[in-house]
Image (tube, coloured by chain):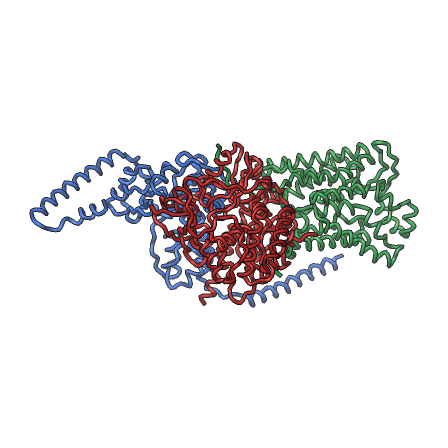
Amino acid sequence: MSRLLVSPSPHIHAKESTASLMRDVVIALIPAVLVSVVFYGWKELLVLAVSVLSCLVLEYVITRYMMKKENNTLCDFSAAVTGILLALNLPYTTPWWVVFIGAAVAIGVGKMTFGGLGQNVFNPALVGRVFLLVSYPTYMTHWEAPQSLFGVDAVSGPTPLGIIKEGLLQGNTVPQLMADNGLNYGQMLFASVGGSAGEISAIALLIGFVYLLVKKVIRPHITLSIWATVAVVSLIFWLCAPDRFTDPLFNLLTGGMILGSCFMATDYVTSPMSVKGGIIFGIGIGFITMMIRYFGSYPEGMSFAILIMNATVPLLNMWFHQKKYGRA
Amino acid sequence: MTRTFSMGGVHPSDSKISRGCAIEVLPTPPTVYIQLSQHIGAPAKPLVAVGDSVKVGQPIAEPGGFVSAYIHSSVSGKVKSIAPRKDLAGNNQMCIEITVEGDEWMEGIDTSDTLITDIIDDNKAILDKIRLGGVVGLGGATFPTHVKLSPPPGKKCEMLIINGCECEPYLTSDFRTLLEKGEQVVVGTAIIKQVLGVDKATIGIEDNKPEAIAHINEVLASLRKVSPKFEGIEVMSLMKKYPEGGEKQLIDAVMGRQVASGGLPIDVGAVVQNVATALAVYDAVQKNKPIIDNSVTVTGECFPRQANLLVRVGTPLSYIVDYLGGMPADAAKVISGGPMMGRAIANMDAATLKGTSALLFLTEKQTRREPEGPCIRCGKCAQACPMGLEPFLLNRLARAGKVEELEDNAVQDCIECGCCLYSCPAHIPLLDIIRPAKGQVIGLIRARKAAQAAK
Amino acid sequence: MTTTIIWTIAIIAILGLVLAVILYLVAEKFKVEEDPRIDEVEKVMPGANCGGCGFAGCRAFADAAVKAPNLDNNYCPVGGNEVMKKVAAILGYTVQEKAPQVAVVRCNGTCENRPKVNDYDGFSSCKVKAALYAGDTGCAYGCLGCGDCVAACQFGALSMDPVTGLPVVDQEKCTACGACTKACPKGIIELRAKGPRGMRMYVSCVNKDKGPAAKKACAAACIGCGICQKTCTHDAITVENNVAYIDYSKCKLCRECEAMCPTGAIHGVNFPKPLDKDAVKARIQERNRKAKEAAAAAAAAAKEAPAPAPVATQNKEEKA
């Protein structure tokens, strides 16, 4: 008989591991990835491949040779998740080297400068995306009619949010713009609205979100509080001036709202631990997003909103704790 | 929706593979080693000397303090030595070694199977019998029962809760006891209820044991016809969730009340006793039989023969294993108790104690710890903590040695259930690190209280 | 254009001035009056903030030293006599010089001497391991090998030897702050006098088990046989709870105990020459023989003329 093992209790462990949780996130993103590839064709596939591969390679190189860590976090899928999310945030026309720069900023600056997995304050994919947005605005707001992989007939141009923003600046009203550009909610929900890969199909993203909820990978409170805030804020403005402001449903279904609220804001590392903190975090994101959409110079504010609220997470974690047993 | 405790908890696989095995009596081993410290509190003082002949049930050690208990010989034979011996953790403990000769019982012990339902009215006499019977809480803490049943003056008990949850995976000894000795458990419950002077008693059983719930309900129905003393005893079906059997969690689940931090169950009007303790109380009061044996589940997927055994206190663990077919080749860890809170055994020559509830064999694959990864701040530990603590935070504070902040974040409330470590996807040894920090903070609080009392 | 620049500069300058005045006033208001000698003492301290003196850090020590009536209870083990002389000079006190000390690991339970009997699989910390059980070897007293002492040492003086699995003290770097002695849950590390030219003797075992049990667990264990105690001519060795202890203030470094120890539990370090066991043993035998003869002679003399036996002989017999 070999020597007995001795350890403190407990002696068994749940099946979940960091890798399995991250793998579930990857699985949850598959519908959105499929839809984007079907709509945008091989160019989107290229963006995805470059993004994921560069994230993985950079993660490995930095942890192995710069941080000199023995335990590599490569096999835990966290870099892959960052890669996919970054790709879904980029237009399919983005050149490969821009994608690579985005990945380098995401992993190198967004994640590793803070100490790697678990230490980063900001969502790495969003750091990469926002860096590209301010550094290469031409590539990041360039929308081209898609060359579909399977010949799906998709009419696409600038994003709905972009259309509205531009139109409003030129003195048009919202209902007029909606009608002129043939924007309708069914289209937004299912697919074929112009925008970055992750923006085109709300339903594909929601399927993934439900998968994560069912697998208990994430809890819904952050997402729901973002949606509720966006709905309330836009409802108030829309009721006051329907010509000037877009309605709640429009705001919930367009832009990076679904991708951001379901996958980016719920990122473990950069969201608050407690439910109370999470709800405030969500309210902040929803509010800032709507302020940028209505009054900012950018048509979309989800990325900025999440990054801004990411910065408040340490504070929220300090202020809000869950209720303890037998204590007031 | 069945009732359960209000926060945290985990759902490990049930794995009660020995639930179908009836309790069988393990033959008496050739030698027993009875440890003098097998309860919380002061070790007992030996009453016998080397060379003395003892009978089954003869007291061989008396309480060494107020919180302490009698210890009885579990066999008849000769005291061979009173010397330190390594316990299951490898630490030296004083043990009385008795060489078995025959099986002669003390006079006055009723060894028949007849159920005695008449309960004497003299509570003082009952408490005395419990004390002399060496009864201790068999749910894990082994706190002397007579002390627990004498609540401090001014505190009123409103409900007796009998813990039949057995929420730990694998364990089935309480379940088998409920099925096979349900009557005795109920009579024991009625005795404790009478001593405490409460009207209500609840036997809490998790809903993964429907047979036990049905059986106890039947027993209650028939016993209520016998005597009014069995009125007010109810069975409550509770949702299966670990750690339901934790004292504080059980009170929360059954009564919807929470014991304040640092408080005792009696502060919210509750006294909790385990099923096995109720049976021991029955034996001590109705049969004059002290604790000389207890049922032990021997189980594990890799173990060839599952069993629930009635084992004499002080039986060497290796004797039990050999009786059931020897150590399986792929067993990597042997645990005394359940997989969540049990203690890993370092020394198979150690002997059983009153509180030994199980011997669990796990393979390397089942139990080997994974390497620790970085915290991804998923908060699963905080969601799992049944005390509402934040293990990720306590872990960080403990590693940094921030004692004051640990106290502010209630590390002293930790019940060491293991839910945090169980659920951590990064395999961070949270409880390993929190446990000593908790000890340190509790020590600090005690020292502060003592300093205040001195003033 | 020019006016803008001038205005900008002017506003910033005024702002700076106003804020400077406010800062000065606030600093004045909240100024804490402190004995200036605290700063002076702190300056001569090593600045390691190790806590070896029993205070939270060098500043806390300086504060306590200034407030105390003398330096009897305040001693910086890291700075040693030199620093304490400086402190004493600042404060006008006298300092009680102490012999320099060094941390000594009193366990020789190497992987070879002390085979493992189980495998530890929990968090690698001696504190956690000690709270759980006796350890992964048969010895419940010895080194647990998780390196809590190494982690506690701020001076990099401790390291784990991968071959023996035991901590090794770098006596050049060790400042005798005592952090390791507090970190070790088994209490095997002791601060002992460094000794002349670093030469010192110690019992490298703290196993309190009876001889056979100790020996079974570890080949290098002290079995409490008491031979060293009988051998020692300086009353430096005591055997209590089956384990010998050398009082370093009495030890004369004769190395006789080391030569006589049957398990090699007694270690002598930094001696210029390796120990010639046979020579020392022969010397001891010779001395014992002479003592016996002297005792016999004394006994014979006592028979002839009843007189009190020599004191030294009497002591020897009592010990035996």
Answer left or right for B14 relative to B32. Answer: right
Residue lying furthest left in this view?
Answer: C304
Residue in the image at 52% along x and 62% along y? B121
Going by the image, does C254 lie left or right of C188?
left
**Which colour denotes chain A?**
green
Q: Looking at the image, is C226 positioned above or below residue C81?
A: above
Write the residue at 16% across / 40% down: C290
Against C75, is A141 above or below?
above
Identify which residue is drawn at 39% across, 58% down: C74
- Pick the quarter of the image with the C terminus of chain B: bottom left
Residue A318 appears left or right of C315: right
Horizontal side, residue B205 vs residue C133: left or right: right
Residue B361 in percent (x, y) is at: 54, 38
Residue B105 can be seen, yes or no: yes
Chain seen in red: B
Rendering quarter of residue A40: top right
A146 or A249, nearer to the observer: A249
- Residue A273 vs residue A7, the one in the foreground: A7
Where residue C311 sits: x, y (%)?
17, 49
Q: Can residue B388 be seen at all in this image of the molecule?
A: no
Residue A127: x, y in percent? 71, 44
Q: Nearer the viewer, residue C203 or C154?
A: C203
Q: Position of residue B375 (x, y in %)?
A: 61, 45
The chain drawn blue is chain what? C
**Image quadrant in which you'd find residue A147:** top right
Comparing C203 with A119, the one in front is: C203
- Count every numbered label the image shows and give the total: 0
